[in-house]
Amino acid sequence: MNQQLVNMAYPSSFRKELFSLEEAIQFLWQDGVINVGELAEKAIVRKSKKLKQNTRGHKGSDFNDKSDSKYVTVTYIRKSAYATITSIQNKIGMLRVMVHEPKTNKNYFFRIPYKVYAPYKNANNSIKIYFNQQGKPRSPTKENIRYDLWDYQCNAEQWAK
């Protein structure tokens, strides 16, 4: 930790305030200091007990089983609501996706096999998980959507397995 940067970023009156670990993490996340995607990777490794995290910058995967972690939040645009999974072009294994839905403050977990998202890689495309305007899960309504990613939903234990 670079103490000089901490001192510059946060006033001494603030640094003297007592926070629980949860409050400190929440504050730092809201302040943009903590990357939630990296927090998700740490959670997977800790929950799994058998997965090892690859070094930073390892191309194609986050973990030793060639899987990759993605953390996404549902976006609401006019009448549409979905979580977009991007940056899949260099991925080589299963995607472990955690979706946060802010209206209901609920997390959803997915294990998406490579064969499901592989057709989208070459087009430098993304894949979406759909919700209704109240924040409830829904299947895609367009016929040209190849997969309903809700078929790959799992619980937190399966997500980290």
Image: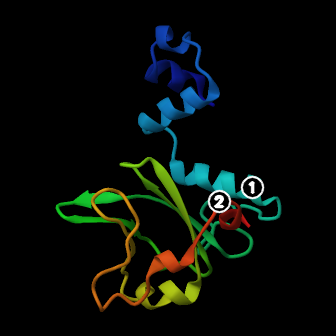
Mark with earlier residue (1, 2) = 1
Please give the name of the residue rendered at 57% of the width and 85% of the height, measured from the top-left corner.
114
Please give the name of the residue rendered at 59% of the width and 14% of the height, measured from the top-left corner.
18
Label 2 crowd bin: few (<14), some (14–19), many (20+), radius 10 Å: some
Q: Quadrant of residue 152?
A: bottom right
Expressed as whole percent of the image width and height from the top left, the position of residue 11 reads: 45, 13
Left or right: 50 as drawn, with respect to 146: right
Label 1: state its secondary structure. Answer: helix
Closer-to-camera residue (120/9)? 120
Left or right: 140 as drawn, with respect to 12: left
Q: Is residue 11 above or below residue 92?
A: above
Q: Amino acid at mark 1?
A: Lys
Q: Is residue 53 above or below residue 24?
A: below
Determine which of the numbered discs, if any, sits on residue 156 in the image. Answer: 2
Expressed as whole percent of the image width and height from the top left, the position of residue 84 reads: 38, 68
Q: How is the image coloured?
A: rainbow
Closer-to-camera residue (19/10)? 19
Outermost residue toward the right? 50
Label 2: state its secondary structure. Answer: helix
Q: Amino acid at mark 2?
A: Ala
Give the CA separation, mark 1 to mark 2. Answer: 9 Å
Q: Is residue 146 above or below residue 105?
A: below
Front: mark 1 or 2? 2
Of the 4 image quadrants, the one containing the C terminus is bottom right
Please give the name of the residue rendered at 51% of the width and 55% of the height, measured from the top-left corner.
107
Label 1 crowd bin: few (<14), some (14–19), many (20+), radius 10 Å: some
Expressed as whole percent of the image width and height from the top left, the position of residue 16 reads: 56, 9
Of the 4 image quadrants, the one containing the N terminus is top right
Dot 1 and dot 2 residues touching (CB under 8 Å): yes
Please give the name of the residue rendered at 53% of the width and 24% of the height, measured from the top-left corner.
6
| Residue carrying label 1 | 47
